[in-house]
Image (cartoon, rainbow, N blue to C red):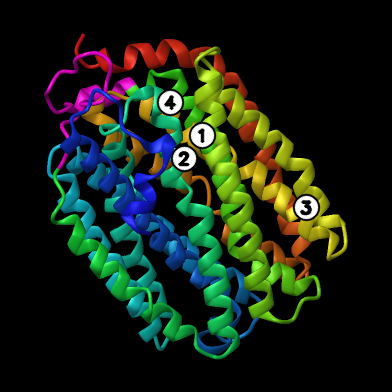
Amino acid sequence: METASVQGMTSGNPPPAMDQASARNARLSLGLLLAINLFNYIDRYVLSAALPKIQEDLMPSGAHADERAGDLASAFLIAYMFASPVFGWLADRTSRWLLVGGAVVVWSLASGGSGLALSFAAMLVTRILVGVGEAAYGPTAPALISDLYPIERRGRVLAWFYMAIPVGSAIGYAFGGQMAQHGLWREAFYLVVPPGLILALLCFKMRDPRRGAAEAQPVAARSARLHDYIVLARTPSYVFNTIGMTALTFAIGGVAFWMPKYIQFRGEPDLGQIGFKFGALTALSGLTATLLGGIVGDKLAARYKGAYFLVSGTSLLLAFPCFLLVLHRPFPEAWAWIFLTEFCLFFNTGPANTILANVTHPAMRATGFALNILIIHLFGDALSPKLIGRINDSHHGDMNVGFRAVSIAIVVGGIFWLIGARYLGRDTQLAPTRIDE
């Protein structure tokens, strides 16, 4: 994404009090991090879109074929979630841009290695390396953004950043599906390497903002100590938000991984068409919902302190009936319900991540995001793709059964988010002083 396009984002403008150089650095940083996040998700969902062809080439059919294919997603996520706390700790103490640049180099080269894989085991190793690379980026990027933009604009700015999730996923689905349909799934992985390396080089030229620079009140300039992290477990907003995000990640991670094959199961044989249609719907619904969610969350937060939780919980509960209609209505009508389901699921992206940023002390913000990543993936989508695959195998390929089973988590997540609303105002106010007492 060109930096100029980010400079024109009204919602992403830095606060007027910033000098011109700081304002420019904030816009450039946001644009670069957004572009990196875009390629991050393109890489993730190229694998999902091309999975049927990868199974044909690298994985023998059998009674547990789908369960084994789910291991590719689980291997990536296990590496990602366990390495994240390590890199989160480093990001609170070292140059964050250096970490981000190194991370992008690692995962770009590992993604290219996925195209070189000649066996399932080799593919598994490359996905683990992609996970390690992304672990250095995942907790670091939102911490950087939170130090560039003040709390009253943070929801909208983080929504722009997380907009890359649906758009990148959509491009990955469409690009991977088209390449796989023409027998070129390996080349799909190769082509994401050069842009990644270029973006990594740009990272090495950026400068870090001061930790806590965008907070409304002065923040102690010190690194968090080990016992300071107990504060996170004692912060209700952090705990309830993490539980809600875990439930959502469990549901959406499993469904997203298997959706191209599910649509094929429902009667659409052309992987290229599946990738294009599903990718287009994901891009449109995710782009509009992510940005609107961030805007609505920020506007409501001025009047209601628990607004970010309220927006997240309500949108998730609305997603549940829409998803059930996806499973029980015929195509092409089901495409409309896929759109509405994704819209509701993406609407909470900005608000939920803004909660994480606002209730953690700046000195431990990257670690706060990292621990959240560990928990939501450990109990979320590290389990659900494999679980759906196992249910598919045990029900003779009937994918509706597995999808219905994991969808219950959507309701669970919505309930926990609504419970958290009562604590958010207090926890946001206390966050900048939590480890200074």
Quarter of the picture containing the C terminus is top left
For disc 3, the marked residue is 337
Q: Which of marks 4 and 1 is in front?
A: 1
Q: Which of marks 4 and 3 is in front?
A: 3
Question: Visible in this render: residue 359?
Answer: no
What type is the residue that disc 4 sits on?
A: Tyr
- Whole-percent x, y for residue 430 in the image: 33, 12
Q: Work out whether 96 lies above or below 74.
A: above
For disc 1, the marked residue is 294
Q: In which quarter of the image is residue 18?
A: top left
Does the magenta run of residues contain 22?
no
Q: Work out whether 175 lies above or below 92.
A: below
Q: Mark 3 to mark 1: distance in Å?
A: 23 Å
For disc 4, the marked residue is 238
Q: Mark 2 to mark 4: distance in Å?
A: 19 Å
What type is the residue that disc 3 sits on?
A: Trp
Quarter of the picture containing the N terminus is bottom left
Tell me whether the residue at label 2 lies in contact with that at label 4, contact meaning CB atoms closer than 8 angstroms: no
